[in-house]
Amino acid sequence: MARTRRTERTATKEDLRAEALAWAERIKVRPRRIQVQAMRTKWASCSTRGTVTLSLDLLSEPKPFREVVIVHELIHLLVPNHGRVFRALMKAYLPDWERTSGGRVSGRCGFQDPRPTPGARDTSRSLALDRRVTRGRLT
């Protein structure tokens, strides 16, 4: 089976860091550190100490999706939850962010496996990005 091409070229770790820094400047936040590493269940995370961690899996994703994940985590430096203020900021910076995320959304922060899981509930109206997969089911 041929693998579909997701981007014209695969981004590098440096590209991803540069994208995150550009967005941080635009949003006017100062992450303490931006790191790119393997993450088993999430696209990204943001620590309470200001470290933004981005998944290596983002390197093969289209730029608009990477931007949704990056902006999501950077906004957590301003707003720790997914309430109204958080959603308003996401919409202000990326008006089509929910559509751009391509249905890979669920009730937790991180990301959801893009492959549909038989019998799994539809979480597409939720606002966070998460992929918590346990034995083929979302938790």
Image (tube, rainbow, N blue to C red):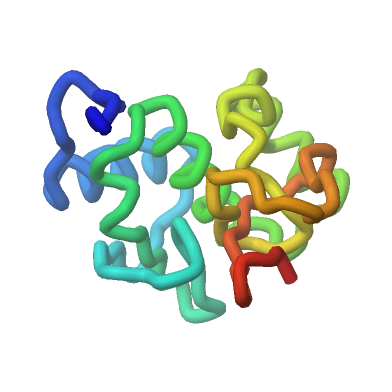
Residue 5 percent across, percent down from the top left: 25, 24
Name the residue furthest bottom: 49
| Quarter that holds the N terminus | top left
Which residue is drawn at the image coordinates 28% and 69% (left, top)?
38
Name the residue furthest front: 1
Residue 128 percent across, percent down from the top left: 70, 52
Residue 49 higher or lower than 139, as above or below: below
Which residue is drawn at the image coordinates 80% and 47% (left, top)?
123
User: Which residue occupies the foreground of this view, 67 or 60?
Assistant: 60
User: Which residue occupies the foreground of this view, 16 or 122?
Assistant: 122
Residue 76 percent across, percent down from the top left: 61, 58
Q: Count the marks.
A: 0
Residue 111 higher or lower than 89, as above or below: below
Residue 15 falls left or right of residue 87: left
Which quarter of the picture shows residue 30?
bottom left
Which residue is drawn at the image coordinates 69% and 66% (left, top)?
137
Which quarter of the picture shows residue 116?
top right
Residue 38 falls left or right of residue 39: left
Residue 83 higher or lower than 66, as above or below: below
Which residue is drawn at the image coordinates 26% and 40% (left, top)?
60
Residue 3 falls left or right of residue 46: left
| Quarter that holds the C terminus | bottom right
Residue 106 percent across, percent down from the top left: 73, 53
